[in-house]
Image (tube, grey):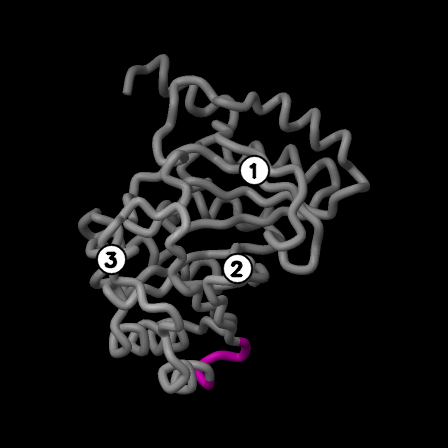
């Protein structure tokens, strides 16, 4: 990346999309949702592939987002930053600080790719939803990136030690998480101190991987497996494909 581009990267958040109102993205609060451009991973079940690339210019100007949020002060409780991968953007810290100064609570959704940048914004975040895709040793099978599980392990530990309210979640497809592997993942997370865990059934909508779509099993994971996972956590939820997702 050229020096000019490096300077531009850090100036303003690269926004790829904006949802003015959501009743589900931040638990219990009405929120707006900011979709940040860019993600280095290529997970087969990704439903936001249009946000994976970072364009030279932001599709939505950050100043316009701020103007919109100023007008909605008092109508919304929170603003959620997601992606893509929000922590990919070097302007995330300053963007969160600007929005927080308006009086909004801050939510963050992350795949835990950049632990250092995540650690830098955790003091500004009120709630975080984070994805753990598989056991740390097998992450490359989902993301296509070697050793991608290690930053996730570090990020999860940072979130748990921060005291920030959170939701840990895993999207479940039988081709990527067998019953034995899913149970192993749940046990690993519980051993790390995760108390709030959500399994999200694979959704074919928006998925570009025809192999995953054709091999999906509605109702997976089944009740016997769920019965073995549920006691590991203080709160445990399963979001089926027909339910609203985060």
Task: Check whether the beta carbons of the residues at disc 2 and disc 1 lie within 8 A of each other.
Answer: no
Q: CA distance from mark 1 to mark 3?
A: 27 Å
Q: CA distance from mark 2 to mark 3?
A: 24 Å
- Which of the two labelled residues, at mark 1 and mark 3, occupies the earlier sequence position? 1
Task: Tell me which residue sits at (57%, 34%) in the image.
Answer: 18
Q: Quadrant of residue 21?
A: top right
Q: Position of residue 67 (x, y in %)?
A: 70, 25
Task: Check whether the beta carbons of the residues at disc 1 and disc 3 lie within 8 A of each other.
Answer: no
- Which of the two labelled residues, at mark 2 and mark 1, occupies the earlier sequence position? 1
Left or right position of 80 against 50: right
Q: Is residue 187 above or below residue 78?
A: below
Q: Nearer the viewer, residue 149 or 54?
A: 54
Q: Nearer the viewer, residue 63 or 59?
A: 59
What residue is shown with label 2?
Answer: 162
State which region is magenta.
231-235
Task: Tell me which residue sits at (29%, 16%) in the image.
Answer: 2
Q: Is residue 68 above or below residue 194?
A: above
Q: Which mark is residue 139?
A: 3
Few, some or many residues within 10 Å of mark 2 (<14, 14–19, 20+) = few
- Which of the two labelled residues, at mark 2 and mark 3, occupies the earlier sequence position? 3
Task: Tell me which residue sits at (65%, 47%) in the image.
Answer: 22
Magenta-span inclusion, residue 21 = no
Q: Which mark is residue 81?
A: none
Q: Is residue 94 above or below residue 105?
A: above
Left or right position of 11 against 107: left
């Amino acid at each position: 990346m050229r020096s000019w581009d490096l300077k531009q990267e850090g100036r303003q958040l690269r926004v790829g999309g904006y949802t003015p109102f959501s009743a589900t993205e931040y638990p219990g609060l009405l929120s707006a949702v900011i979709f940040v451009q860019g993600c280095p991973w290529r997970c087969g079940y990704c439903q936001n592939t249009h946000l994976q690339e970072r364009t030279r210019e932001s599709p939505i100007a950050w100043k316009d987002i701020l103007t919109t949020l100023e007008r909605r002060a008092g109508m919304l409780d929170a603003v959620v930053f997601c992606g893509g991968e929000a922590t990919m953007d070097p302007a995330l810290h300053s963007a969160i600080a600007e929005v927080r100064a308006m009086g909004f609570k801050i939510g963050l959704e992350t795949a835990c790719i950049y632990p250092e940048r995540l650690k830098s914004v955790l003091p500004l975040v009120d709630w975080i939803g984070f994805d753990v895709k598989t056991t740390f040793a097998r992450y490359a099978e989902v993301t296509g990136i070697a050793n991608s599980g290690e930053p996730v392990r570090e990020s999860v530990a940072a979130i748990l030690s921060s005291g920030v309210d959170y939701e840990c979640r895993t999207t479940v497809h039988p081709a990527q998480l067998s019953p034995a592997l899913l149970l192993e993942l749940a046990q690993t997370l519980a051993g790390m101190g995760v108390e709030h865990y959500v399994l999200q059934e694979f959704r074919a909508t928006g998925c570009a991987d025809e192999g995953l779509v054709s091999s999906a099993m509605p109702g997976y994971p089944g009740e016997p497996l769920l019965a073995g996972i549920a006691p590991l956590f203080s709160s445990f939820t399963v979001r089926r494909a027909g339910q609203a997702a985060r």
